[in-house]
Image (spheres, helix red, strand yellow):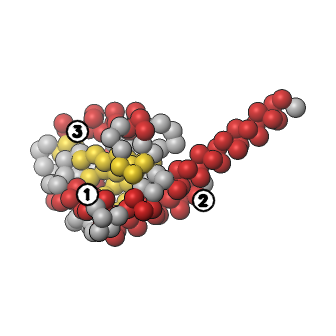
Amino acid sequence: MTLNLAQSWQDALDKVRTWARLNSPWLIHYNSGSCNGCDIEILATLTPRYDVERLGVKLQGSPRHADVLICTGPVTRQSKDRLRRIYEQMPEPKFVIAVGSCAISGGAFQGCYNVIGHIDEVIPVDVYVPGCPPRPEAIIDGVVKLLQKIGKQ
Ligand code: SF4
């Protein structure tokens, strides 16, 4: 009886957490070696013109408070460990969006002496947003796709 009650409390709490996450995902942004083009588009997504906060999306400074890691650029030798550390510091469940061709495949930086590869060679990626750089509409679309995926799970 007590076990059943504890389980139903846990289920209710999980539902509330999922509801909160779907209605207000908190993002942290990390540039692992991009040329800044993709980062400027992410900033534009947060400005009043696109106003992603109206969808409840909030940019966070700390990985410990973030649900979603939004990554740009290829992964350089210097940034690889930092990228992994940021991902490990995020609480479960956590999600990753790779923004831009470089984050997806290495893009223009493929083969550079200081580049070790793309984001999903270091951490798991849930949604890919292609483009060089992708426009804010595409980034918003990526966030919506991630929320739909979380909702289905
Ligand atoms: S995808 Fe294009 S804009 Fe984005 S980091 Fe690579 S080269 Fe720069």
Task: Give the camera-side residue of 93 and 20.
Answer: 20
Image coords of residue 24 (percent x, y): 48, 53
Where residue 36 sits, quadrant-wise, is bottom left
Q: Mark 1 points at which residue?
A: 43
Mark pair 3, 2: CA separation: 33 Å
Q: Under tag 2, what secondary structure?
A: helix
Image coords of residue 69 (percent x, y): 37, 47
Q: How many marks?
A: 3
Relative to 80, 86 lies left or right: right
- Point out the tag, 3 or 2, that comes first from the N-terminus: 3
Q: Under tag 1, what secondary structure?
A: helix
Image coords of residue 87 (percent x, y): 38, 38
Residue visible at 30% across and 64% down?
48
Where residue 153 sits, quadrant-wise, is bottom right
Residue type, label 3:
Ser
- Point out the tag, 1 or 2, that comes first from the N-terminus: 1
Query: Quick check: 104 above or below 3?
Result: below
- Neighbour class for label 1 at 10 Å: few (<14), some, many (≥20)? few
Q: Mark 2 points at which residue?
A: 152
Q: Name the residue under label 3.
A: 79
Q: Under tag 3, what secondary structure?
A: helix
Residue type, label 1:
Leu
